[in-house]
């Protein structure tokens, strides 16, 4: 039987469980024949979702707050992303050499995040561009699937 590739836009529902915010469920929103169309729809849904104030939540509070579970970027790449958006970097810290998840910056710092959230709220930063760096904690994602028939 012949198959063809389709691109699904999925919504990831995140839930706080009294300790951390983790994915709870995935719901398919729509299927597309072209990846570009699926990505455009994902971005549209993301913009709508972020317009509801979701972007004020610190992305580093997701996935146990561990840097490497939040983004596939290196810490240097993430710092470059923030600089490109003209956002401040969080305070530096001495990483624990014994901790494989240790970072040079305190990405969960509340005061730093408040400054970033204020800029997002003021509309100074494109929220989709901002959230693009957090590839492991997206609200919507595009996945490839095979369709029979």
Image (cartoon, grey):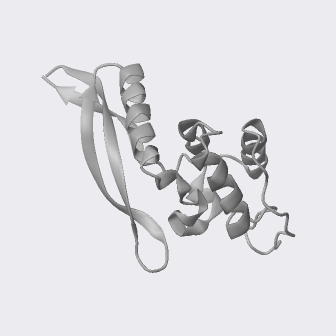
Q: Residue at x 76, y 63 (%)?
A: 103
Q: Whole-percent x and y of residue 64?
A: 54, 69
Above or below 5: residue 49 = below
Q: Nearer the viewer, residue 58 or 33?
A: 58
The image quarter in which residue 45 lies: top left
Is residue 109 among the parts visible in the rendering?
no
User: Farthest residue in the front direction?
Assistant: 122
Is residue 40 among the parts visible in the rendering?
yes
Q: Which quarter of the rendered picture does the C terminus lie within?
A: top left
Figure label count: 0
Q: Residue at x 72, y 41 (%)?
A: 81
Q: Whole-percent x and y of residue 134?
A: 57, 48
User: Would residue 109 be found to the left or right of residue 122 on screen?
Assistant: right
Q: Whole-percent x and y of residue 114?
A: 66, 61
Q: Residue at x 29, y 33 (%)?
A: 145
Q: Whole-percent x and y of residue 107?
A: 70, 62
Above or below 133: residue 60 = below
Q: Nearer the viewer, residue 14 or 53?
A: 53
User: Would residue 112 be found to the left or right of residue 140 on screen?
Assistant: right
User: Farthest residue in the bottom direction?
Assistant: 18
Q: Residue at x 56, y 41 (%)?
A: 127
Q: Which quarter of the rendered picture does the N terminus lie within?
A: top left
């Amino acid at each position: 039987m012949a198959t063809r590739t389709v691109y699904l836009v999925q919504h990831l529902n995140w839930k706080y469980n009294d300790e951390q915010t983790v994915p709870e469920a995935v719901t398919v929103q729509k299927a597309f024949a072209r990846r570009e169309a699926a990505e455009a729809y994902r971005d549209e849904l993301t913009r709508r979702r972020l317009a509801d104030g979701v972007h004020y939540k610190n992305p580093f509070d997701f996935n146990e707050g561990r840097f490497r579970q939040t983004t596939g970027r290196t810490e240097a790449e993430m710092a470059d992303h923030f600089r490109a958006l003209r956002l401040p970097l969080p305070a530096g810290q001495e990483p624990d050499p014994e901790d494989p998840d240790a970072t040079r910056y305190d990405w969960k710092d509340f005061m730093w995040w408040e400054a970033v959230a204020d800029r997002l709220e003021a509309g100074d930063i494109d929220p989709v561009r901002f959230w693009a760096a957090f590839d492991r904690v997206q609200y919507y994602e595009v996945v490839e699937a095979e369709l029979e028939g």
